[in-house]
Every structure is written in structure tokens, then in C-alpha cells.
Image (spheres, helix red, strand yellow):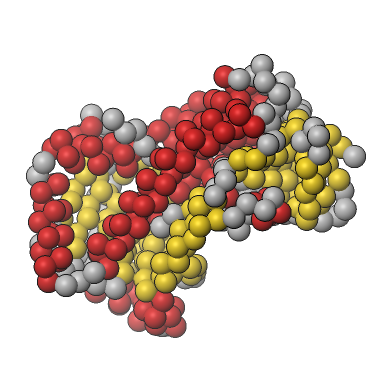
Amino acid sequence: MREYDVIIIGGGMVGLAFALEFSAQRNTSIAVVDPGEINPTIHESFHTRVSAITPVSEAFLNELNVWDAIARKQSFHTTKVWDQNSHGQLNFNALDEGLDHLGSIVENDLIQAALFASLDRKKIECIESRLTDLEKNAKGYQITLSDQTKLSCQLLIGADGAQSQVRRLAGIDTSDHDYQQQAIIANIACEKSFDGAIWQRFLSDSIIALLPLSDKQASIVWSCKNALASELTAMQDTDFCRALCEAVEYRFGEIKLESERQVFPLIERSAKDYVLPNLALIGDAAHNIHPLAGQGVNLGFADAQELNRQLYTHADKALGDHMVLRKYARARRTDNELMAKTMTGLNWIYKENNEGLRWLRGFGMNLIDETPLLKSFLQKHALGKPG
């Protein structure tokens, strides 16, 4: 049996970020286990899975000496929101916070590849396999992989996404909220520029986010009720593009698809326990939220940072000490659940379309837009730096 100090199940962005920071703080042995390609191949065309990286997450990736190694990234300096069913609009601008940009749209694969390239392979072993079983013992955990290999560790990290096998095998329950919606994602090219902005439009039955990949290319996230999602995915490409143009009022001229459309269900999920003795969940394994604000990976990076902070602060304690892990869980649960409930609340506000609520929604959006202190408060939270 091979023994490690830490085993991380999940070699995505959050798992690799945790491994990279932890290995820099301690001279320990680490294994990263993932059944997929931990070091993804980068293609010339844009990948459809992207993230809106906040300045706080950018600073974290800079600290890991990763940010400059990311081959493609598109910064944005404004966020523009407009509502189909009211006169309301919101405009967030980096200059209001003394920043030159509000964030950057980056393909997930590029972040993962840059993190992988920075790993100290003398400390970190990457294992391409699937977790099939885990067993608690006096020192930590023994795990079994799909090829029957057995590994042991003092601290087991679940960074294996929304369908976490670590969470399931450890018997950790979740609270789930099914939005009865699906997200359609695709890459598009437009006639007109995005002007360095993220654009969001709230419609009666859906929300569209356009995340710029270049001046005239973007990744879209179209969050729809299930019935509409079925209609849109069944359309021919030309019909889908026409529907998208109409939904955003032809603001960007004609639109054409540059990728296949992908669809996934929208479910808010939160683990009832982030930690057990010698075990911690981070990222989507602990929580995943509506993609309305594109905050998922930023919350995951914050988890990785906080867990590393607690482990470093309490380095005199045994690795996997439950009290130390609970400090991490307490520090992160409030922020994660506040963001999740905010997204649920916004989703409810915008899907309700009675006349009174439409008027109130538009009034509220314009009030925020015209009140610098309130707008700054909301923008700071979106940037990942409340206060």
C-alpha cells in the first residue's frame, strides 16, 4: 500500500490549486487522483466551459505563479444588466472601485493546464484512476481505486465536483434545490463588439449571460425553464441563433454559433457537512450554485485558500485534526450559503412576472444603479471582497 500525507480526489482547477498552495507550505507527500485528463490538451478554438475570474481569484493565481502562464484570457471592465419586462438596468464599472477591470473570462482548461504545469512533481503524484471505496482508520483514510490499488493518507480532500464520490462514500448528505431549469452553453461570434463588458438579460422565462472571449466572440449561458430549454436545443443552428438575437434585441448584430450547444440541469446543492475527521470537501463537492453570477470557481478557490490557511496556522496539530478542519468549514459555509441564497432569490425575482413585481424590480435596479454606496457594496461582494 502506498502512503501519502494528503490525497486529493479531483484534479480540476480547485483540487490542483489546493495541491499547489499546500505543497509550497509543507514538505509533504501528496497524491492527486482523477479518472480524467488532469493535464488537458489546449486547442486553438475556445473551449465552451469558462469562468469569470474575480480580482481576488486572480490575485490567488498570481500568488501561485500561474496567472501569467494562462495562454488566453479576456478582461472585462463593465457588467451591463437589462430587463425585458421593466425599465430597469444596472451598470457596474471597474472605475467605480478604482480598478482597471472587474475580472477576466478564462477557459477552465487553460487554468487547469497552467496549474498542472506549476506542480512540483517531486512532492505531488498525479494518478489517473477512479475512487471506488474509502475506509476510515486510526490514522486517516484508506482508499481503493478502480484498478484495485490501495492508498492511505492522513487527510483526504474531496475536490471531485457536484457528483462527488468522496462525499457519497463518506455518507455526507446534501440539501438540494432543483431549479427546474437547464443551462445551455455555447460559443458564439457576433457582428458587433462586446465593448469589454459582460452582458446579462433577464427575460420572462430565462436569463442570458454573454461572457466575452474576444472583442466579438463570447461564451453564452442561457438559463431556461425545462420546456424552453428543450425547444431551444431541438432547434437548427440558424433558428437558435435567430432566437438568441431576438432575446438580446439584436444588440450585437447577427450571431453565429462557433461550437455545439451543451445542456446541463441547474441544481443548487450544499453538503450538510463540509468536514469529517481527516476529511474535507472543497469547491463543488461542498456546494454548487446557480450560474447566474459565474461565482462557482471563485468560491472554490476561496475554499482552497481558507483550508490551506487553517492547516498552515495550526501546523502544530495533526494533519486532519477535526477541530482544525471545522474552523475551515465555519469560515466558508456562511459566505457560500449567502451567495447560494442570493442567487436563488435573484432567480425567483426575475422569473416572477406579475405587473407589480415587474415595476418594483425595475425601480429597484434603477435605484441601485443611481446609488453609488449601494452599488459599490454589491459590486464588492461580486468581486469577492466584501466590506
Q: Quadrant of residue 318?
A: top right
Total residue callouts: 0
Quadrant of the image for the N terminus? top right
| Residue 35 sits above or below residue 85 on the image | above
Position in image of residue 325 (x %, y %): 60, 32
**At 80% from the left edge and 32% from the top edge, which residue is drawn?**
139
Place of residue 166 in the rendered image (x, y in percent of width and height, measured from the top left)? 68, 50
Q: Is residue 108 left or right of residue 195?
A: right
Compared with 270, 359 (above or below) is below
- x and y percent of residue 380 in the render? 28, 36
65 lies above or below 116: above
Q: Residue at x 39, y 62 (%)?
A: 221
Vertical order, 146 against 377 (above or below): below
Q: Quadrant of the C terminus?
A: top left
Q: Is residue 198 at all visible to an observer of this figure?
A: yes
Residue 178 position in % (x across, y down): 45, 66
Which residue is at the front of the view, 82 or 215?
82
Work out whether residue 99 or residue 320 is closer to the camera in this orientation and state it.
320
Residue pushed farthest right? 1
Left or right, 298 with respect to 124, comes to left
* Residue located at (69% from left, 50% from top): 170
Is residue 64 something that shows in the picture?
no
What residue lies at 10% left-to-right and 64% top-to-bottom?
359
Image quadrant in which you'd find residue 326: top right
